[in-house]
Structures are given as structure tokens and as C-alpha cells.
Image: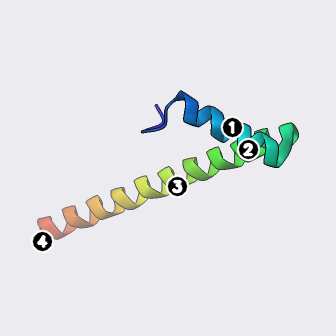
Amino acid sequence: MFGRLGGTEIMVILAVGFLFFGPKKLPEIGKSFGETVREFKKSAKDAEEAITEATKVEESK
């Protein structure tokens, strides 16, 4: 699910995050991280589609 991270590693990361940021900030940080990942995936998909379209135009010439 999280690549090479196991359950113990995820628990340690969450515990350290809890100590650094506190329980009120963690949901906000998670939400902004999720939005960042979503935007990155969208940009990567758009770039891939633009490259695919450009190569189709070149092949048709």
C-alpha cells in the first residue's frame, strides 16, 4: 500500500508527526499533502496527453 513502508514504520512516522505538529495540525497537513499529490498526478497526466497528441500529429505528417 505504501511502497516499502510497513506497519511499524508508518506508526513511527505518525507518532513523530503527532509530537511535532500536535493533533490539531495533522489533519490539515494530511489534507494539503493529498491536494499536492492530486495536483501533481493531474499535471503529469496532462503532460503525458500533450506529448501523446504531439507525437500523433508528427506521425500523421
In whole angstroms, how far apart are the C-alphas of marks 3 and 2? 23 Å
Q: Amino acid at mark 2?
A: Gly
Instruction: Answer left or right for 2 relative to 48.
Output: right
The image shows residue 13 at horizontal and vertical percentages of 64, 41
Residue pointed to by mark 2: 17
User: What residue do we see at 35% from left, 62% from top?
Assistant: 50
Closer-to-camera residue (48/55) = 48
Q: Amino acid at mark 3?
A: Phe
Q: Nearer the viewer, mark 4 or mark 3?
A: 3
In whole angstroms, how far apart are the C-alphas of marks 4 and 3? 32 Å
User: What residue do we see at 17% from left, 70% from top?
Assistant: 58
Indicate the secondary structure of the residue bearing disc 3: helix
Q: Nearer the viewer, mark 4 or mark 1?
A: 1
Other-residue count near label 1 (Cα within 10 Å), few / some / many at <14 / 14–19 / ≥20: few
Indicate the secondary structure of the residue bearing disc 4: loop
Q: Earlier in the sequence, mark 4 or mark 3?
A: 3
Residue pointed to by mark 3: 40
In whole angstroms, how far apart are the C-alphas of marks 2 and 4? 55 Å
Q: Are marks 4 and 1 in contact (CB under 8 Å)?
A: no
Other-residue count near label 2 (Cα within 10 Å), few / some / many at <14 / 14–19 / ≥20: some
Residue pointed to by mark 1: 14
Q: Earlier in the sequence, mark 2 or mark 4?
A: 2
Residue pointed to by mark 4: 61
